[in-house]
Image (cartoon, rainbow, N blue to C red):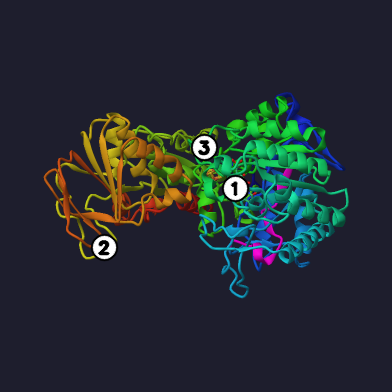
Amino acid sequence: MKSTPFYGNIIPLAYIEQTVNPTNRYPHIFRPLNIGATTFRHRIMVTGHTQLYGENGTLSERHIDYYRERAKGGAALLVLEQQAAHPAGRNYHAGCGAWDTSVVPWYKRLAEAVHEHECKILAQLFCAGAQGSSTQYFDDWQPLWAASRIPSAVTEEMPVAMDQANIDELVQYFARCADNVRQAGLDGIEVHAAHSQLLGEFLSPAFNKRKDQYGGSIENRCRIILEIGSAIRDVVGPDILLGLRLSFDEYLGPIGITPEQSEQQIEIFSASGLFDFFDISGGGYHNLHVAVAPMGTVPEGFLVDCARRAKKVAGDRAKIFIVGRFLELSKAEDVLSAGDADMVAMTRAHMSDPFIVAKSAEGREDEVTRCVGANVCVSRLISNREVTCMQNPAMGREKLWGAGTLDTLSAGQQRHISIVGGGPAGLRFAATAASRGHHVRIFEARAELGGRMYELASLPTREGWQTAIDNLVRPLKRLGVEPNCKTTITANNIDGDIIVCATGSSWDRSGYSPYRPERLEIPGANLPFVVDLGHAIKRAVADKTALGQHVLILDETGEYHPLGLAELLSASGVKVEIITPRPFIGAETQRTMDLPHVMPRLKAAGVKITAQHFVERIEHRIAIIYDIWGGEPYPINDIDTIVLGMTRSPDDALYRQLVAEGRTALKIGDVITPRPIEAIIYEAEKFARSI
Ligand SMILES: Cc1cc2nc3c(=O)[nH]c(=O)nc-3n(C[C@H](O)[C@H](O)[C@H](O)COP(=O)(O)O)c2cc1C
Ligand code: SF4
């Protein structure tokens, strides 16, 4: 028997409309929007976001399932992940191209899957420009095309400046792609001219240094897009939608695209009569941390001023879509009611919970798994791996774990399950097992739930992690499972048909480093002024001076914890130094886009950061440091506390004891081995579905 899982209700919007009236709650959202011949049933959309589920250069079954789920969940418009318009414009390994007719059957299936749920879908056509990779496709290496010979700060590749023949070819390729889109029955096309990819480069004075008719004046910089728009219109006619995605502000000051320049561009594009909408974004590859802002950095709807200005220029000649960290329908409602935009995009919000619209429309906002800005999604994209959400392991696995896939148990199959540990593994396992009908109890030794997430939530700007904990706890409460906190469990006071050990892991105290495999510990790491990262954070949160006035953090994690601890301490005047043997500090936080936000704050607070250095030994209040490439070691003196941010080890004592006693025990999460939180939540879901 199938049931609706707690995190993804499949109630169709038609049903919602009959039972409750969402127009009362969000009157400006639940108003149809007409653009040309197309009617959108309401005003919440999802902008293009690359999932990397492609196979053989085009879409896959995984894509169809992914978009169908979000259509089912109530979105009015989905923009398909960027589709390269030309072979020179591809970037990611599993990226898709749109120029070959082989895409038509895929697009057709996609359109059918989405239309079945009264949702519209547009293809986003793009070229990566300097942001591509010339050696990505093994049998088709070719130079990158760009507006000018300016390399990307991300890929660091020198592109070719396109000549007239290249430009003419590109325009023709866009037209070919458009014909494929038209034949397949998608609802339209968004030409991607944002985020300093190829067409964004043409628009930007920072990346377009051309002296011909495509460079110099704003009119000239817009020319290639007008030629593309015109070629597309010739193919698709007036009846399917055509829009442009633009970075309204490149955040480069007067050297890049400024809001004032964008107003002029939008005037030119509106006057052309080619475009039905402008989809307003901001930033580029040089500052992706703004375009895809992580937790604790920008306010919800931070680009609304841009939309308001764009709308004023476009008037009734084109509609304005806006994006930018929208997390709740209520904020979107405010924007729409003020008339600042015609549609609001909630993109990561739909990765985290595809049913956010349906649930909110029904007044079940407390059932939404709210996006917290952890940016595991974009970090996976940057690592060229399939994109998924840290909180939603069903993202990209809709066929397996999407709405309606959870089996409930028949009478007699239910077990009494005791879960020890209220971190991400225990909480997720508990909710899924309870949803299936098991009798679940969960125990946590600390007063607070969340485990490792709670540690993170206590650091400056990391409140989003508390939201992630709340997202895990709310379903449990709805299922009538009340977590037992402040309850220490041993093998003697626990029972149940199955005991699930989700007791997590602890930071190591030995100082073992994979960079020094010949030694098992740092000499002197056992001195009393040396503490591990977990205890250091706990003590500093309780009392910011508890670690003294001079703290040295040794970081091998590349994660946020050491940076957050440094920020917490330095804000209270503590002198903080961080040393890492890695090439630079915070590699993980660079991928999640946190690094460019936190580093200036640390610099301003006087935190000293030294990369490619490590510790030879520790003496009383002294660390002997060395440059990993050679040279004489030197001391750092008068240290009050040394913090070890090194490896973690499983807290598996309970599991081992239960197994020794021959009892039925299961270990999950860090108890198996410490891993990223998304891997832990995935595993908890997998195991809880299998028992
Ligand atoms: C994993 C990921 C992939 C993205 N890929 C694209 C893309 O293919 N095309 C595009 O225009 N924007 C892309 N974006 C940017 C989003 O469209 C959107 O502008 C951004 O996520 C901010 O919106 P949000 O705060 O609602 O998530 C991507 C964002 C993420 C997180
Ligand atoms: S990984 Fe984080 S930022 Fe990305 S969708 Fe999930 S919760 Fe949001």
Residue 65 or residue 142, whichever sits in front:
142
> Mark 2 or mark 3, which is nearer to you?
2
Between the residue at mark 2 and the residue at mark 1, the CA separation in whole angstroms equals 58 Å
Q: State the image coordinates of residue 360 (x, y, percent, origin top left).
A: 66, 32
Helix, strand or loop status at disc 1: loop
Q: Which residue is mark 1?
A: 408
Amino acid found under the numbered disc labelled 3? Asn
> Mark 1 or mark 3, which is nearer to you?
3
Q: Residue 12, can we see it?
A: no
Please provide the residue range marked out in magenta. 75-92
The vertical placement of 425 against 305, above or below, is below
Q: Which residue is mark 3?
A: 471
Q: Is residue 547 left or right of residue 451?
A: left
Does 81 appear in magenta?
Answer: yes
Mark closest to the chain's N terminus, 2 or 1:
1
Q: Is residue 72 left or right of residue 650?
A: right
**Which dot marks residue 629?**
2
Q: State the image coordinates of residue 363 (x, y, percent, origin top left).
A: 66, 29
Q: Is residue 217 left or right of residue 136?
A: right
Residue 312 or residue 614, whichever sits in front:
312
Q: State the image coordinates of residue 244 (x, y, percent, origin top left).
A: 73, 46
Mark 2 within 8 Å of ligand 1, using the beta carbon: no
Residue drawn at x 50%, y 41% is 294
Between the residue at mark 1 and the residue at mark 3, the CA separation in whole angstroms equals 22 Å
Mark closest to the chain's N terminus, 1 or 3:
1
Residue found at the far bottom of this picture? 139
Amino acid found under the numbered disc labelled 2? Trp
